[in-house]
Image (tube, rainbow, N blue to C red):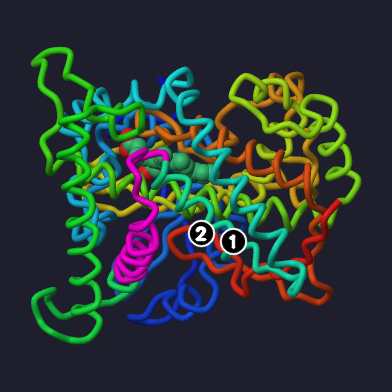
Amino acid sequence: MNRLKSDAMTSLKQIPGPSGLPILGVMPEMVSDMLGLFTKTAREHGGIAQFKLLNKSYFLVTDPDYVKYILQDNYKNYIRGRSVETGRVLLGNGLPLIDGDFWLRERRLLQPAFHRERLGKLASTATDVIGSTLDSWSQRIQTQPTLDMDEEMMHLTLTIIIKTMFSADIDDKILALGHAFNVSSKFMLWRSQQMWAPPLWFPVPRNVEYNRAFKTLNDTIYPLIASGRKEPKDDLLGMLLEMRDAETGEGMTDQQARDEVVTIFFAGHETTAATMTWAFYLLSQHPEIEEKMRDEVKSILGDRTPTFADLPKLTYMTKVIQEVLRLYPAAYLFAREAVQDDVLDGYPIPANTLIFITPYITHRDPTLWPDPEKFDPERFTPEQIANRPKQIYYPFGEGPHVCIGNNFALMEMQFILAMTLQRFRIKLVPNHPIAFKPEATLRAKYGMKMTVEKI
Ligand code: HEM
């Protein structure tokens, strides 16, 4: 019998977990240090644990075999369900918020737009945006040599995703679009943390600000979709609109296209920005790794702007990025809801249970990774990868819902690192405090103040 899926006759095991306070459960620790709570729970109670919040039970699953079972082997029984409900006000029926046949149809429609060879067409847009950002750094550091890399990366990746989505001349709209997007994603995060929030039509200031931002997004995006249909372009939107369902021949409606555009802005920018911020932090702590990477960049590119064809040659840089994503997986937490009762390796999983999955904990598990806190890109040589179970590393998730934008993200991150290392040396400002701000993604709590020096 499969170790993971035992039948109902097996005597079921009790799922361990912290006892917590009466009624509140682990609420105080959850609010003060969620990652600390999850790490302690997993280390003390194992790869499947349960905890209570306001008398409701939640599961934390970090054993890589169990994660694989939920995300891949029996994924149909583990849906996004209510874990993504608050996102719906902004993202509608975007890909990460839907399940079942609807999701499958949409995923098949979107997938070809993210194939590597199609991404190549977006490469020069990305390098143009990065080039202009680096030019602006050159100017700014003449008077102010420190930059907050967290802010810089958020702005840069949002601009890259907007400009690769819409090649139309929208420079005059980027500021308003970026602002509207930031207001609405902050609002969505805030709502997801509330026990109760006033309905959207109720005119409290927060709702008024959100509704205005929501309108700006729609007023900008719908006309761009209309003109993208009239005059198809070689941008990400053009690729989305061109896609046709293999069975019905149908493409996306305007509403679906809008939902996917906003979803891609949301899923694709903060994750990449957070990863880059942590990469700059880690490199500043490991100058020998930074120099090795710079040598690779110099020998392959010299001073010229990288192209899509150069990227596979940056093999050391790829290892560095993989290791950054091991220690700081930007999508550090996602969730599933069980549809029907299930049994996982003898543990009962009742229907409707909400299950938290966190690569952050699996990636730092000392029983899976030797010296797990050490930043060591050599873990990602082909030999090392081949010698360990694949499922112990899942920064992009796994199974059918695996990140659709992983190649896009990798392309973007390689361009950002290569072009930055060609021009600048970046150091953490002495005594800058480092702590986590685990929100929608794994951000740096105090930003990342760094000194930027021309080479
Ligand atoms: C370093 C950057 C990124 C990380 C760490 C990341 C991580 C993830 C993870 C873990 C998932 C799976 C979530 C789950 O199973 O519930 C996911 C899904 C997704 N990601 Fe990413 N992502 C990144 C960049 C991007 C980019 C650049 C895009 C788009 C351009 C994107 C679009 C999506 C979408 C649409 C989904 C939903 C896929 C589906 O449900 O079928 N992501 N991402």
Residue highlighted by disc 1: 152
The residue nearer to you, when weighing 149 against 225, is 225
Asked if residue 379 lies in the magenta stretch, the reply is no
Residue drawn 54% across the image and 41% down it: 395
> Regarding mark 2 in the picture, which secondary structure is present there?
helix
What numbered label is drawn on residue 82?
none
- Seen in the picture, residue 413 relative to 202 is either above or below; the reply is above
Residue highlighted by disc 2: 155
Residue 427 location, x and y as percent? Answer: 81, 62
Residue drawn 18% across the image and 71% down it: 211
Residue drawn 77% across the image and 62% down it: 452
- Seen in the picture, residue 362 relative to 75 is either above or below; the reply is below
Q: Do the residues labelled 2 and 1 touch (CB within 8 Å)?
A: yes
Identified by mark 1, the residue type is: Glu
Residue 148 lies left or right of residue 395; in this view the side is: right
Identified by mark 2, the residue type is: His
Q: In which quarter of the image is the N terminus?
A: top left
Q: In which quarter of the image is ligand 1?
A: top left
Residue 384 lies left or right of residue 407; in this view the side is: right
Asked if residue 173 lies in the magenta stretch, the reply is yes
Crowding at label 1, few (<14), some or many (≥20) Cα neighbours within 10 Å? some
The residue nearer to you, when weighing 63 against 302, is 302
